[in-house]
Image (spheres, grey):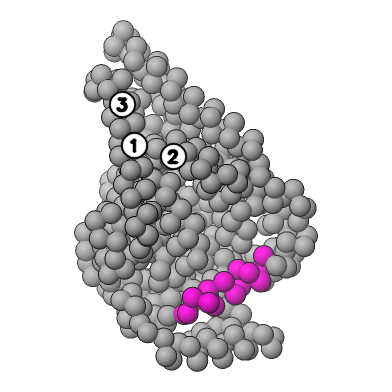
Amino acid sequence: MFLRYNVLFINNLIIENLPMSPVNQLSSFMPVPEDIDFILQAEYAKKLRTFLPPEAFAPNINKLVILLINLVILVLGWIIADKLEQWSVYYLWLYLPLAVVMGNSIIALLFTSHDLMHGSVIRNPRLMRLISLLGLTMLWMPPTLWKAVHNRVHHKNTNNFGDPDRNYLDEQPKTWGKWIQNLFVPSAEVNPFWLTVGMTSAWGVHTFRNLTSVLLFNRETVDYVPAAFTVSAKDRRAIAWESLVIFMIHLSIMAYLEFNPIKLILSYFLPIAIGYAGVMFYIYTNHMVCQMTSVNDPLINSLSLRVPKIFDLLHFNFSYHAEHHIFPGINSDYYPLVQELITTHYPEKSEKYILDAGVAWRLLLQTPRHYKNETTFTDWSREKSVTCPLSQKYTSDIMVK
């Protein structure tokens, strides 16, 4: 308790003299200095780690095999698709189950690459970069960009001002990036047609926004992203080269399929659309229905889902997302154990950070998608003002008002 009161005192003292970055100049939100960002996240990790076995933090190299299997599934799908011109048009529908399997492989490639980049699979940086380039190619995501946007920026600023994955703030300008996100994301106002389009393409928009922000400008003043960030000159060059490699791989796949419309639709665009839709379901429910937090509390700014066990098996327990934010580098097989420990040691918070997947989705469709303040959503026209359904007070003695 003494520590928390001192944190609050230091926090307020620093905030009074903190230089305001462009995003922090938005009047409805309170900036927090970087050195206090991890107070609660670190507190959870320190307390719970003592109850976890050492092997939970050991690299799980078996996921490299899973990544390879899913790459093979995609290659086999394209090999079969190359023969589609020999099929009768009445039998083309038989390819659809394979397209679904290929779509799931794209989801699996992202999630295995996600774990790989967090260091829970192997620890060799060069090998990690090479393998993740293969794993992230179908997502058009350069691994160096992913390391910056996800590992460095998102995890440090989860659902805060600096988080590139959060909802836009109401006070942010109505740029093309904000307009597209408003059009696509699940909300009380979204058109079902555009929601469907967004499910299959919003990942591409997310990647394009951050990629162009870094490659073309590399400034924190870029306003068409929720929160701009910068990378070093070395990383910027690496992102450019990785983007070129990814482009050439995609071009090679299309060339192998002879740019045939039927082959491309069934074995390239359809699996990508299915994969992106699955990925976006998780991403939308990870944080977007949660309140913003000035202090990084994964049990408030992140959401874990209850999903059928088959999806946890296929997607490496990605539904345990708050647990991942407490232990980013842990073997995902141990996320259920982390959840058990949280419900034991923090029962007052466990009631709100775990939801059935269907409930989380309905909440997204019942609320606007722009932050009016930390705990209130509003819509594009600013006509609505809806309190975040999951909002709850921080621990009273660390709350920043």
Q: Residue at x 59, y 56 (%)?
A: 328
Q: Is residue 39 magenta?
A: yes
Q: Compare residues 275 and 123 and report the one nearer the observer.
A: 123
Quadrant of the frame with the N terminus: bottom right
In the image as oriented, which residue stretches furthest toward the front? Answer: 234
Q: Quadrant of residue 95?
A: top left
The type of residue carrying mark 2 is Leu
Q: Residue at x 47, y 67 (%)?
A: 157
- Asked if residue 395 is positioned above or below residue 152 in the image, the reply reads below
On residue 252, the disc is 3
- Is residue 192 visible from the viewing direction of this image? no
Are there few (<14), some (14-19), or many (20+) residues within 10 Å of tag 2?
Answer: many
Q: Which residue is mark 1?
A: 245
Among numbered discs 3 and 2, the one appearing first in the sequence: 2
Residue 216 horizontal side relative to residue 70, left or right:
left
User: Does the residue at mark 1 contact the one at mark 3 (Cβ under 8 Å)?
Assistant: no
User: Does the residue at mark 3 contact the one at mark 2 (Cβ under 8 Å)?
Assistant: no
